[in-house]
Image (cartoon, rainbow, N blue to C red):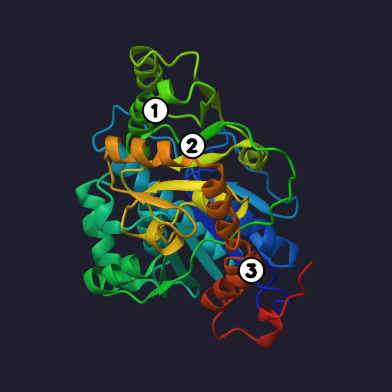
Amino acid sequence: MTESAGEPRTSPGLMLVIASLLGGGAERQLSDMANYWAAKGVNVTLATWSGPDVQDYYRLAPNISRLWLDTRVSSRLPFAIHLASVRRILQLRRVLQALRPDAVLSFMDISNVCTILAAVGLDVRVVVAERTHPAMNRVTSLPWRVLRRIFYSRADRVVAQTGHAAQWIALKCRARAVVIPNALRRLPQIARKRELLILGIGRLLYEKGFDILLQAFAQVAPRFPAWRLGIVGEGTERRALLQLREELNLIDRVEFTGEVREIENWMARASLVVHPSRREGFPNVVLEAMGMGVAVVCADCHSGISELIADGINGRLVPVGDVNALALVMAELMGAPGLREQLGREAGKVRQHYEQSTIMRQWDSCLFEGASPAVLASPET
């Protein structure tokens, strides 16, 4: 993948870094981006902080180099977690020194801080990407949030998915922030009759709000006995959600499908997609559901959601965490097939607005700024 010192690089080299390639929106987005660049002739290396024991969920093109940065540290050692982080940073630094990529792109906050530290003093362009609004993310521990504020200014660019997030990063981290929304991958046109099916899609985590969706569905289910709810995904809240399903007497009406690889086939069947998250960035699931022409209901997280959905035009917004409001909107749409069709038709226009090649040109400019025109004009497939 690398050329010897002094030889001209015939195509750009790009290093991508993320925690893992487990199923998730950020992981899908980076995998799609990696495959896109690889098809253009970019020398892509994708590295994860996880080890090879954590299986990749998303497929990568065969010409993408795959690396694992996991470093085993005995849990008996003092400060084992911190020692593991230091070792991973040093390992990434060695990889960057060996490969000499033109640019390194990291996804998600902790990975971003580690990547910035690994690249200090190296001749490589460093771009990091936040996948949620940092002010709304309380999952990341305080020390990492402090490090983010200190070191984001060392990155050449910090990419946010929304204007609100970019403003926060520029103000709080004194970083050079730019906005690049998610790209919408090429989706199939699937012509089939929609079923009386509601979908909730995402990792089964507290912040995704599937408990809210179950409670809202429990309110409307007696009025709409033909409708079913499918919850697609896996996560740590699965057992609690299964118990809640039983407590709400919804066992016969709600299916937990686990992870589904070709989610567009489920979206083509559904009449309604509900995204009840307590916090969000720019959710890939919502973008893809809209692209598949489904009527979408989302909790208004005041960030990426409101930039995607105009309430009553191409979807519906409800207050975050409000079970009753969600139930009311779900009932309204479940009883109005014409309205669902109208919202879905307008939602489908995201296929043009977020088309992949358009968004990827923004990434090219961000990552290879100052590179030769030949680099930026790599042929597309």
Count of number-bearing discs: 3
Q: Is residue 28 visible?
A: no
Eyeballing the image, is 297 above or below 13?
Answer: above
Q: Is residue 84 visible?
A: yes
Q: Secondary structure at mark 3?
A: strand
Q: Which residue is mark 3?
A: 13
Mark 2 / mark 1, whichever is N-terminal: 1
Q: Position of residue 241 (x, y in %)?
A: 38, 22
Estimate the spatial distance between the alpha carbons at disc 3 and disc 2, rounded to whole Å: 50 Å
Q: Which residue is mark 1?
A: 220
Q: Position of residue 353 (x, y in %)?
A: 58, 68
Q: Are marks 3 and 1 in contact (CB under 8 Å)?
A: no
Q: Residues within 10 Å of mark 1 (few under 14, many from 20)?
A: some
Q: Which residue is mark 2?
A: 334
Mark 3 / mark 1, whichever is N-terminal: 3
Mark in front: 3 vs 2: 2
Q: Name the residue type under label 3.
A: Gly
Q: Within the image, what quadrant is residue 76 found in?
A: top left
Q: Residues within 10 Å of mark 2 (few under 14, many from 20)?
A: many
Eyeballing the image, is 221 above or below 293?
Answer: above
Q: Name the residue type under label 2.
A: Met
Estimate the spatial distance between the alpha carbons at disc 3 and disc 1, rounded to whole Å: 53 Å
Q: Within the image, what quadrant is residue 58 found in?
A: top right
